[in-house]
Amino acid sequence: MSREISAEQMNPSGDSAAMSDSVENIRTLELKPLPYHEAMRDYLKEEEADVWHWYASNKVRDEQAEAVRFELLKSTYRVERQAQPETYAAAEDVARKLWADREPQSDRKIQEMLEGRPALNHLDLLAQRKVAGLTRRLLDALLSRRWMQTEPVLAHACLFFEDYVPPEDLLEDPALAEELRTDDQPMQDYYGYVLLDFVTADRDLEELPLAAALVLAEKLGLKDRFTEIAKRELRLRKKQLETIDQDKEKLLAKANEGPPP
C-alpha cells in the first residue's frame, strides 16, 4: 500500500512561489539515457542479441513496468511537490548542474558515480568491456613506434585482439592516463604486465621496448609499479634499470630516426 504525505503535513505554511519555480525548472531538464545505459544497450545488442530482443519486446517491457510500479507502491513514500518544495528544488538544482547545463565532464562524473573505477577482481560485463578497450588503447600507444611493429610483436598483439592493426603514425592519447587511473593494485599490475609482455616479445629489439614502456608508463602514472614489475620479472639489477631509464629518451630518439622494420 502506498503512503502519501500531504502538503499540509509537510509544508503547513506553504510556499507557492518556490513550488512554481521548481515546476518551471524541471520542465527544462532533458531526460535521456546516461552513457552507462547506452553502453549496456550496445553490449546487449552486439554480444547478447537474443537477450536484447527478448528484453526489448513490448510484453517484457510492460511486465517490468508493472512490477516496478507495484514495488514502488509497496515500499516507498510518495512526497508531493507541494508538500516538500525544498527537496524538489535541491534535487533539480543538482540535476541542472550535472545534466541540464551539460558541463563538459558531466557524463564522465555521472558514469564514475554509477560504475566506480574498475577493480580487477570485481569486473562486471561493462567493466570487462571497458578494460578491453583501454588495453587496446594501451597497445596502440606503445606500438605506434614503427620499429616496434616487428612480426613477433604484432603476432603477440593478435593474441590480445585477433584483428589488431597498429597505428600508422606515432600516437598521443592524452585522455588515457586519466582513464587508466586506479587505486586497485591488481589493476595496476595488469597494465604493468601488459607492457612487460611487449618488452619481451622480440628479443632482437634489445633494450628499446623497455625504454618505450618506461616513457609510456611515466606518462600514464604507472611508472613506479611498472619498474617494480620489470626489475623483478626481468631480473635486472637496480643500476641496469636506472641506466635505461636515464637514457630512454635518447635511445628512442635514435631508434625513431632509423628505417621501419
Image (cartoon, rainbow, N blue to C red):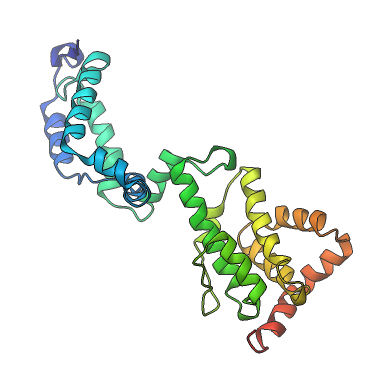
| Closer to us: 56 or 237 | 56
Residue at the (64%, 51%) spot, across then down: 190
Q: Is residue 134 above or below residue 96?
A: below
Residue 226 point in image, percent of width and height: 71, 56
Residue at the (39%, 53%) spot, across then down: 105
Task: Say which quadrant the C terminus sits in.
Answer: bottom right
Viewed as shown, does residue 44 lie left or right of 205? left
Report which quarter residue 10 is drawn in: top left
Q: Is residue 22 above or below residue 245?
A: above
Residue 138 point in image, percent of width and height: 57, 62
Residue 204 point in image, percent of width and height: 76, 76
Residue 70 point in image, percent of width and height: 21, 19
Viewed as shown, does residue 11 lie left or right of 90? left
Report which quarter residue 216 is drawn in: bottom right
| Closer to us: 34 or 125 | 125
Task: Say which quadrant the N terminus sits in.
Answer: top left
* Number of marks in picture: 0
Q: Residue furthest front?
A: 50
| Closer to us: 6 or 211 | 211
| Closer to us: 179 or 141 | 141
Viewed as shown, does residue 137 lie left or right of 243? left
